[in-house]
């Protein structure tokens, strides 16, 4: 009788422990992960704005000097003073920025500095001023889909009526 009662109490304790673990996994764990996802989203949004800033600075630089800047430092405070120092250093908002000269203009790439809690998202832009993204470890390129800079969502082209 006592052994059956002990076994019942052990089963009850194990049942409560499993239930509490399940509640933690379903309710509490996602709540703990959300701040990290929110930070990632905020960094991506700030990165989109930084790419817009770089594109605007390149247009201004081109109108002043007759060519596009060849590096971020040419746009920074120590040179043309068109972008902030942290952006001209090449790393801000959790992303590493790279400005590359091309025969027809320039390219901008932004790649996350560290592994993110969400799927990595990289960005690309050029003298067309369109911003493109890629979800995954490969850097975004000119062949990726264009996103709108205001909301970060991909642009879906309107259907062509014939």
Image: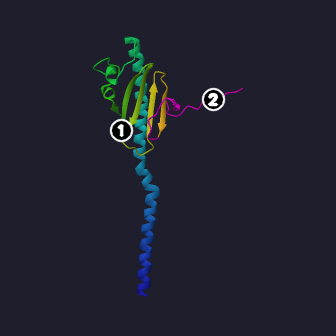
Bounds of the magenta segment? 136-162
Instruction: Please state, as top left, top right, bottom left or bottom right, where the C terminus lies in the image.
Output: top right
Q: Residue furthest left?
A: 78
Query: Mark 2 falls on what kind of element?
Result: loop
Q: Is 110 situated above or below 81? A: below
**Does the magenta segment cover residue 85?**
no
Give the number of the disc on residue 113: 1
| Residue beneath disc 2 | 158
In percent of the image, x 37 and y 29: which residue is there? 98
Q: Is 114 situated above or below 84? A: below
Q: Is 9 situated above or below 48? A: below
Between the C-alphas of marks 2 and 1, the distance is 35 Å
Residue 139 found in image quarter: top left
Q: Is residue 149 visible?
A: no
Q: Is residue 154 visible?
A: yes
The location of residue 122, given as percent across then percent down, is 44, 36
Instruction: Please state, as top left, top right, bottom left or bottom right, where the N terminus lies in the image.
Output: bottom left
In percent of the image, x 45 and y 30: which residue is there? 124
Query: Mark 1 falls on what kind of element?
Result: loop
Q: Residues within 10 Å of mark 1 (few under 14, many from 20)?
A: few
Compared across the picture, whether 90 is left or right of 125 comes to left
Residue 10 found in image quarter: bottom left
């Amino acid at each position: 009788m006592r052994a059956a009662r002990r076994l019942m109490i052990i089963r009850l304790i194990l049942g409560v422990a499993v239930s509490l673990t399940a509640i933690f996994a379903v309710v509490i764990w996602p709540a703990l992960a959300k701040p990290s996802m929110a930070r990632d989203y905020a960094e991506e949004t700030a990165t989109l704005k930084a790419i817009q800033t770089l594109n605007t600075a390149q247009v201004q630089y081109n109108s002043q000097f007759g060519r596009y800047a060849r590096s971020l430092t040419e746009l920074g405070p120590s040179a043309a003073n068109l972008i902030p120092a942290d952006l001209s250093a090449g790393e801000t908002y959790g992303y590493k920025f790279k400005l590359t000269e091309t025969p027809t203009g320039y390219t901008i790439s932004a790649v996350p500095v560290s592994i993110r809690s969400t799927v990595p998202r990289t960005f690309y832009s050029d003298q067309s001023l369109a911003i493109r993204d890629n979800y995954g470890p490969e850097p975004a390129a000119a062949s990726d889909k264009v996103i709108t800079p205001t909301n970060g969502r991909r642009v879906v082209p309107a259907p062509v009526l014939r």
